[in-house]
Image (tube, grey):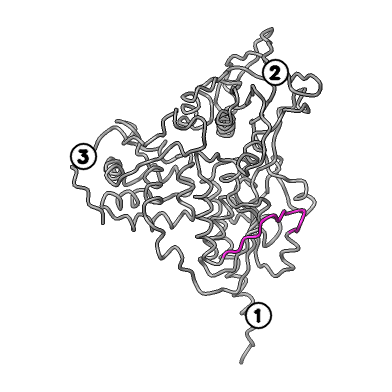
């Protein structure tokens, strides 16, 4: 138990996180948000929580993490207990609690009188400061069942860990040379250091989970091959890594890249050819990540977004950090053509926008202003408007897909139209958050366990001789 001698009282303002100053981070990839550094900070922040009887934070969290019990453990100085509660939902808490979108914080009722409780930072503090518990590595006796997981991203890692805890033999097939999915390939090092992700995957592997890297579904194997190898169940969760493009003239010019590919190459340590002046197009988290990474690599980089600053879907803290780092945000601007010279990007033709009537998202629709076109010189364009799952080979495999190229699944079981094959994460929802993928993976784990149990009981009944 932790004892903090300083008197604590409920306060309306949050305990601020430690943030690396701009001058110490602008030309490197050191972690920027350092979170809480002392037990005193964490316990003072935890004491602000009302421990609601009907917690809206839990309701807002896709994984329905038991936030009140967790925070109460911190209030009482029970670090190990808090860590054990974390481990009931998260197999990689250090990583997820650096990049979670914090739906729980947005729903916190403490905002009525002050700042919301900084739940993610409390979870991160416990994950960082308290050792993995003994129970994390405990698992049931072997069931004899083999399960294949396609993709080592948030959904795949979650399913692999909790299925292994049940005593199943689990093998994870991953296309990339490293685990983590978008957490490793898409999130910059200054937000989530890769060594933290790798350390947590090593812990998952200690349960007996096997990882095979460089294995591409649809190219190296299919679900039929896995069933032939003796697997009893398969979960596909290889994410949404296929770029979506604006489909404007000039996208075939040298110097036009997609943010997903740009961030992946940087994170894998590949040589990246940068322009001197770069336009990043988009207003989501990927766009903000791309623009801040390009800035750290020494480029004069600008963000272009067709809506207003207030409508940007990226996390507010990340937008503010980009502004602090001196990155210009050009809002209410929309690219309509990429202009080239000798096959290379030379400039970007844009049109000014104004906000009109609300669209299907509830936000005012951006409307072009007639006659407002203008040209800005750039020698590189990074598009960050969206991405989608690879899907061509899935249709050829007989899977039913939605019009968004995602798996059509049973809403109760998450099983696809092919028996014994489940899907979760971005393959089902389209590009979404890591916590949504984690929540879906937990449902798949329950479904696979129920399926295998029922199958085993049926087999046992069929093999039991009838007696008079």
Q: Quadrant of residue 10?
A: top left
What residue sits 52% from the left and 21% below the top?
309
Q: Nearer the viewer, mark 3 or mark 1?
A: 3
Q: Position of residue 1 (x, y in %)?
A: 26, 57
How crowded is the residue under tag 1: few (<14 C-alpha within 10 Å), some, or many (20+)?
few
Q: Quadrant of residue 371?
A: top right
Q: Does residue 438 appear to the left or right of 228 in the view shown?
A: left
Give the Cα distance between marks 1 and 2.
69 Å
Q: Which residue is mark 3?
A: 9
Residue at the image position 61 percent from the left and 79 percent from the top: 460
Gap between marks 2 and 3 measured at Cα = 55 Å
Query: Marks 1 and 2: which is nearer the front?
Result: 2
**Residues marked 1 and 2 touching at CB (< 8 Å):** no
Which residues, given as a range, are shown in magenta? 209-222
Mark 3 residue element:
loop
The main secondary structure of the magenta stretch is loop
Query: How far, Cα to Cα, is label 3 from label 1?
Result: 64 Å
Q: What x and y, as percent, mark residue 3?
A: 22, 52
Which residue is farthest bottom? 468
Res 348 label: 2
Circle 1: element type:
helix
Residue 211 lies within the magenta run = yes
Residue of label 1: 462
């Amino acid at each position: 138990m932790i004892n903090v001698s300083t008197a604590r009282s409920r306060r309306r303002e949050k305990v601020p996180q430690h943030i690396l100053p701009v001058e110490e981070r602008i030309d490197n990839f050191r972690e920027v948000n350092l979170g809480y550094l002392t037990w005193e900070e964490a316990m003072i922040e935890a004491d602000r929580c009302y421990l609601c009887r009907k917690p809206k934070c839990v309701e807002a969290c896709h994984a329905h993490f038991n936030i009140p019990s967790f925070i109460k453990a911190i209030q009482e100085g029970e670090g190990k207990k808090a860590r054990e509660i974390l481990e009931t939902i998260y197999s990689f808490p250090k990583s997820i609690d650096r990049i979670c979108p914090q739906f729980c914080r947005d729903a916190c009722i403490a905002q009525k009188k002050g700042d919301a409780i900084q739940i993610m930072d409390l979870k991160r503090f416990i994950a960082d400061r308290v050792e993995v518990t003994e129970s994390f590595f405990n698992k049931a006796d072997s069931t004899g069942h083999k399960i294949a997981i396609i993709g080592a991203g948030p959904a795949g890692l979650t399913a692999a860990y909790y299925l292994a805890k049940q005593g199943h033999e689990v093998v994870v097939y991953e296309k990339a040379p490293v685990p983590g999915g978008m957490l490793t390939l898409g999130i910059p090092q200054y937000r989530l250091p890769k060594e933290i992700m790798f350390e947590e995957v090593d812990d998952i592997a200690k349960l007996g989970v096997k990882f095979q890297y460089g294995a591409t579904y649809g190219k190296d194997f299919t679900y039929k091959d896995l069933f032939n190898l003796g697997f009893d169940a398969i979960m596909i969760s290889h994410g949404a890594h296929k770029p979506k493009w604006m489909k404007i003239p000039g996208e075939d010019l040298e110097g036009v890249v997609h943010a997903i590919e740009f961030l992946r190459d940087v994170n894998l340590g590949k040589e990246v050819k940068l322009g001197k002046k770069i336009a990043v197009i988009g207003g989501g988290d990927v766009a903000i990540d791309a623009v801040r990474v390009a800035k750290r690599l020494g480029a004069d980089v600008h963000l272009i977004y067709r809506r207003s600053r207030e409508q940007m879907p990226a996390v507010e803290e990340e937008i503010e950090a980009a502004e602090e780092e001196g990155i210009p945000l050009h809002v209410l601007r929309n690219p309509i053509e990429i202009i080239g010279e000798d096959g290379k990007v030379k400039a970007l033709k844009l049109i000014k926008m104004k906000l009109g009537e609300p669209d299907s998202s509830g936000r005012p629709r951006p409307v072009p202003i007639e006659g407002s076109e203008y040209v800005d010189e750039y020698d590189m364009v990074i598009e960050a408007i969206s991405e989608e799952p690879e899907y061509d080979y899935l249709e050829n495999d007989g899977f039913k897909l939605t019009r968004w190229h995602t798996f059509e699944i049973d809403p109760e079981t998450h099983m696809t139209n092919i028996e014994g094959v489940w899907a979760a994460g971005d393959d089902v929802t389209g590009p979404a958050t890591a916590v949504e993928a984690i929540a879906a993976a937990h449902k798949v784990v329950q479904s696979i366990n129920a399926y295998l149990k029922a199958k085993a009981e049926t087999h046992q009944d069929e093999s039991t001789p009838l007696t008079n």
